[in-house]
Image (cartoon, rainbow, N blue to C red):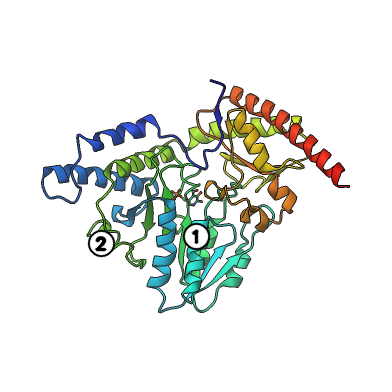
Amino acid sequence: MGRKVYLDNAATTYVSGEVLSEMLPCFNAIYGNSNSLHSYGRDASAIVDRARDRIAHAINAQKSNEIYFTSGGTEADNWAIKGIAHAYASKGKHIITSSIEHHAVLDSCKELEKEGFSVTYLPVDKTGLVNLADVIHAIRKDTTLISIMAVNNEVGTIQNIKAIAKTAHDYGLVFHTDAVQAVGAFRLDVQDMEIDAMSISGHKIYGPKGIGALYVKNGILIDNLIDGGNQERGKRGGTVNVPAVAGLGKAVEIACRDISINQQKLKAIRDYFIKSVKEKIDYIQINGHPQQKINGTVNISFEMAEAESLLMLLDLDGIAVSTTSACMSNALEPSHVLRAMGLSDDLAQSAVRFSFGKNLSKSDIDYVVEMLVKDVARLRSISAITKAGRK
Ligand SMILES: Cc1ncc(COP(=O)(O)O)c(C=O)c1O
């Protein structure tokens, strides 16, 4: 089998050994329903409690009961936006978010608009940053909720969450952040950062898929998500997915414990990759903020090389990258994020996301750059022929 290199860790990661070991006993040895009163149930319930404690501790929540398990980041975002907007609807029906949010947030806002809510989608600058002055300017008498993502999934730009959260509170508003791409990238302290609600996901941090959590600070109102059971304090009914919850708890604990070592590694790999690409390939543009960005994600436009074609050529070389976020990757439309950042259609359509994992070596990067040089040159030669033919 040929060489394979996975550079799509922002789409999903493998499940780490430590996480898997935490999960496996929950499939057979400890299989009780965490809601049952007997010892089987109590054993399962203890595992769920431990996972909740681990997450609460990792993000410095005041109480473990502020963590609610969900089926992932998408559900956490949906619940936060709709649940909080509905709970505060008697105070007002205006929400502020950004134009570069994940579709889990954007589409939830669109649904609320159909119900009569109004939403301000803030612009971003060319680095993908929301301007605090724009946030303040957008606040109205009927605003109740501000939701701004901590880290953008396509370009890796880190927003000034603490300042925006503080502003929200100065005006008596609730602040939610989608931190799916931020967990493990830097320390998230919900008390220090004044975060009222925060979405996280398991499968971006070497945990299992289909599990996530929503942190909701005690005192913040949120409508119930699923009726029919007293799980998750009656707010999200349904038998708890104990193995996945155990895995999420461990994954969050490890991601937050190992931030500095992992980030050192990722930064070295990312810097080496960018240096090599810049040395060997002309006409590129690195998208996102030059400094205020996570180490794990790099977004590069290769002018005159169409990104989907480049993805497929790299795939033939055993290299996995992505063009926009994974869930939109068959949409074939220029990314809403890159468009909001002001990229021309040409630059947006030639943008590729490389997202690094903690097990990559320099030799993996050498191989990727070698293949990139070859594949970009090939596409550019076709593009030159096409352009010449059109003249
Ligand atoms: C920023 C962001 N929010 C939300 C999600 C959705 O998370 P999940 O896949 O767990 O539903 C993703 C995943 O792509 C993401 O990157």
Is 88 placed left or right of 158 in the picture? left
Other-residue count near label 1 (Cα within 10 Å), few / some / many at <14 / 14–19 / ≥20: many
Q: Where residue 214 sits in the image (x, y, percent)?
A: 38, 55
Q: Where residue 216 sits in the image (x, y, percent)?
A: 37, 59
Q: Residue at x 34, y 67 (%)?
A: 223
Regarding residue 365, the answer to whether it shows in the image is yes
Q: Which of marks 1 and 2 is nearer the N terminus?
A: 1
Is 340 placed left or right of 163 in the picture? right
Three-letter residue code for mark 2: Gly
Q: Residue at x 16, y 46 (%)?
A: 41
Q: Where residue 366 sits in the image (x, y, percent)?
A: 65, 24
**Looking at the image, is 96 positioned above or below residue 232?**
below
Farthest-out residue, left:
38
Residue corresponding to mark 1: 105
Q: Does the residue labelled 1 lie within 8 Å of ligand 1?
A: yes
Would you identify the image quadrant in which residue 377 lies? top right
Q: Which residue is drawn at 54% across and 28% down?
A: 360
Regarding residue 198, the answer to whether it shows in the image is no
Q: Which residue is drawn at 20% across and 48% down?
A: 34
Q: Where residue 184 sits in the image (x, y, percent)?
A: 47, 42
**Looking at the image, is 285 positioned above or below residue 81?**
above
